């Protein structure tokens, strides 16, 4: 018996399948809509246990393509994201470099800052004393106070970054 070529269902076709499934149609009835056997649609339902999956959406924390491009261009010119994040660099006992980083603001504020005169004057950021930051945290400083952009001279870029 000759096999039919594999079929790839579009999003619209899958939505129709889920609508018919929720309406109580059998696999055979749904498959007949596409002139196929029930086994060709069974996998669509089996992947999620017969429960319609949530629609795909972009994470609100994900950067847009334009934002990623702007960051990429900034890095090529030697600008640093340390101006919009707090980073600490350590070396483990095996000699591996470890970077711990936390974003200091949301994407919109970060890009507004990266277009500002303050960023043009100091794209690298300033050094932060981890012990002083920890002491402020233990003393009850708020998240906004801990992540506020400190004033100071540009911090040196570690040689291990490979940026002159």
Image (spheres, rainbow, N blue to C red):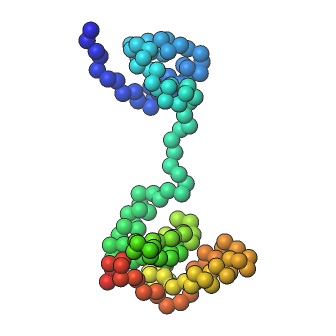
Q: Residue furthest top?
A: 1
Is residue 100 at least partly visible in the picture? yes
Residue depicted at 37% across the width and 67% down the height: 72
Nearest the viewer among 121 and 146 is 146
Is residue 117 at least partly visible in the picture? no
Q: Give the percent coordinates (x, y) of residue 99.
A: 46, 71
Residue 20 in the figure: left or right of residue 74: right
Residue depicted at 74% across the width and 76% down the height: 140
Q: Give the percent coordinates (x, y) of residue 49.
A: 55, 27
Residue depicted at 50% across the width and 56% down the height: 62
Q: Residue furthest right?
A: 140
Residue 86, compared with residue 25, is above or below; it is: below
Residue 19 in the figure: left or right of residue 14: right
Q: Give the percent coordinates (x, y) of residue 100.
A: 51, 71
Residue depicted at 36% across the width and 27% down the height: 8
Q: Which quadrant is the N terminus positioned in?
A: top left
Q: Give the percent coordinates (x, y) of residue 60.
A: 55, 54
């Amino acid at each position: 018996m000759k096999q039919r070529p594999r079929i790839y269902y579009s999003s619209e076709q899958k939505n129709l399948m889920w609508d018919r499934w929720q309406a109580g149609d059998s696999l055979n009835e749904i498959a007949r809509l596409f002139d196929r056997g029930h086994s060709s649609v069974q996998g669509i339902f089996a992947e999620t246990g017969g429960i319609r999956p949530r629609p795909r959406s972009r994470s609100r924390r994900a950067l847009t393509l334009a934002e990623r491009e702007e960051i990429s261009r900034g890095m090529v010119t030697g600008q640093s994201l340390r101006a919009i994040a707090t980073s600490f660099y350590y070396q483990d006992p095996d000699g591996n470099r470890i970077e711990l980083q936390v974003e200091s603001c949301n994407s919109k504020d970060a890009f507004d800052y990266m277009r500002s005169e303050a960023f043009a004057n100091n794209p690298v950021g300033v050094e932060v004393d981890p012990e002083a930051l920890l002491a402020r945290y233990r003393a009850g400083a708020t998240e906004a106070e801990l992540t506020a952009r400190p004033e100071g001279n540009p911090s040196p870029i570690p040689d291990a970054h490979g940026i002159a």
